Image: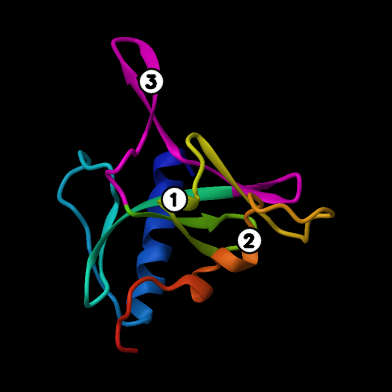
Amino acid sequence: MNTKQIGDETEAKIMAALIAEGYTVSVPFGDNESYDLVLDTGTALERVQCKTGWIEDDVVRFKTASKTTSEGDVVLSDYGGEIDAFSVRCRETEQLYWVPTEDAGAKSTYLRLNEPEIAHPSVNRAVEYRLENQFPGSIDR
């Protein structure tokens, strides 16, 4: 599969999981928005950027910046206020995660799979961000 197909598969799996939990999910028309999905929690609309993560050095890693080409130059830009959360699928494990933007880094984010040897407040433990532990909003399930 090419990267576009992998991204489409990630979006579909995230959308299916959210719908299975009773959320209404909308997809913006076209490819021009910074978000991939709009999630209706029953009390709010959340703009969601879907990402495919991978395992590297005992963490699930995913990019939190968009890479585009402009006039032949590669440009990295963050989502600065244009999304509310990242939803991530780890390809190796098929585990889904929900990461609010305030918990994400500017270019990449790492979700630690195992307990760190030293407790540190900036360590993101993957288990805490599993989608089933982080379902957004207050939908009546």
Q: Is residue 82 magenta?
A: yes
Disc assigned to residue 75:
3
Q: Would you call the spot at circle 3 few (<14 residues within 10 Å), some (14-19), or many (20 or more)? A: few
* Disc with the residue nearer the chain's start (3 vs 1): 3
- Residue at 15% x, 50% y is 29
Q: Which residue is mark 2?
A: 126
* Disc with the residue nearer the chain's start (2 vs 1): 1
- Boundaries of the magenta span: 54-83
Q: Amino acid at mark 1?
A: Glu
> Is residue 95 in view from this perspective?
no
Q: Nearer the viewer, mark 3 or mark 2?
A: 2
Q: Which residue is mark 1?
A: 102
**What element does badge 1 sit on?**
helix
Circles 3, 1 touching at the beta carbon (< 8 Å): no
Query: Which residue is most to the left?
Result: 29
Q: How far, Cα to Cα, is label 3 from label 2?
A: 29 Å
- Residue at 84% x, 54% y is 117
Query: Which residue is most to the top?
Result: 72
> Looking at the magenta stretch, what is its main secondary structure?
strand
- Residue at 52% x, 64% y is 96
